[in-house]
Image (cartoon, rainbow, N blue to C red):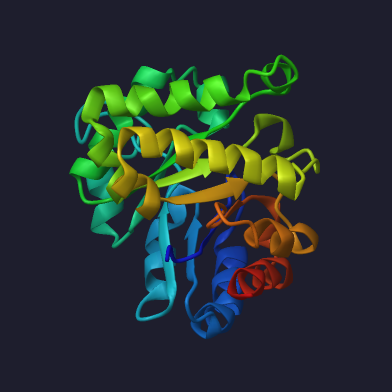
Amino acid sequence: MRTPLVMGNWKLNGTKESVAELLNGLAGPAAKATGVEVAVCPPAIFLGQTEALTKDGAIEFGAQNCDLNVAGAFTGETSAVMVKSFGAKYSLVGHSERRTLHAETDEVVAAKFKVIQDNGLVPVLCIGETLEEREADKTNSVVETQLAAVIAAHGVAALENSVIAYEPVWAIGTGKVASKEQAQEVHAHIRQWLTAQDANVAAKVQILYGGSVGPATAAELFAQPDIDGGLVGGASLKVADFTAIIEAAQA
């Protein structure tokens, strides 16, 4: 059995005050969520505060991005070594906003995946198609290509110590959510495709759904056999909403 994982991606949001309020408010619900992993990915500037507020608690945390380099003359970047030093467990890699706004190719994403993993963090590999690609019936080929880039560079075994997050780009931050049937269909395809590469890895790897996950949709999404939790955006910034999503993962 794969353990459900509910992870909040705060993106470019938060203040010292709101981070404290949010993490303090989630501490109790996370502790009560037996059999569910709870994690948050704050902006890098809040990693130290997050470490302090989650110490000895049930909330894990990670970075939203890590640089390709671990040190050097790369102004404004954050390295996996830095993130790990704060006690983080995860780092997102390949989020669609990084791919589109920062021109990160599949090859760059694969390289970052390895740097993150080599420095003791669990990569959360984000994959997904645009609306145009879905309408052109290219969803399966897009997610296969994005996964294949990592496998070609590092081998399928590298995915065993990772998380995959399927996020249809057309549903991120738009309020549109793939139906439970649409989401399960893609998750099942991902797992079947991985099974052809390595059945053991396919059985173990957590595959999260992302894309406007909220309290109203979480339970039916998480009930699907190949959906192992959620990568949650806007709803993870509200204690009540994120708590409801955590509780839905226990059902």
Q: Is residue 123 left or right of residue 30?
A: left
Q: Quadrant of the N terminus?
A: bottom left
Q: Is residue 69 above or below residue 32?
A: above
Q: Quadrant of residue 178?
A: top right
Residue 163 at x, y percent in the picture: 41, 48
Looking at the image, which is closer to me, 53 or 248? Answer: 248
Residue plotted at (73% across, 60% down):
220
Residue 24 in sight in this render: yes
Residue plotted at (46% across, 32% down):
94
Q: Is residue 239 left or right of residue 198?
A: right
Q: Quadrant of the C terminus?
A: bottom right
Looking at the image, which is closer to me, 121 or 46? Answer: 121
Q: Is residue 209 above or below residue 129?
A: below
Looking at the image, which is closer to me, 163 or 24? Answer: 163
Q: Is residue 32 left or right of residue 138?
A: left
Q: Quadrant of residue 66?
A: top left
Looking at the image, which is closer to me, 225 or 4? Answer: 225
Residue plotted at (69% across, 38% down):
172
Residue 35 at x, y percent in the picture: 47, 77
Residue 186 at x, y percent in the picture: 60, 37
Total marks in image: 0
Q: Is residue 76 left or right of residue 87?
A: right
Residue 101 in sight in this render: no
Residue 13 at x, y percent in the picture: 62, 49
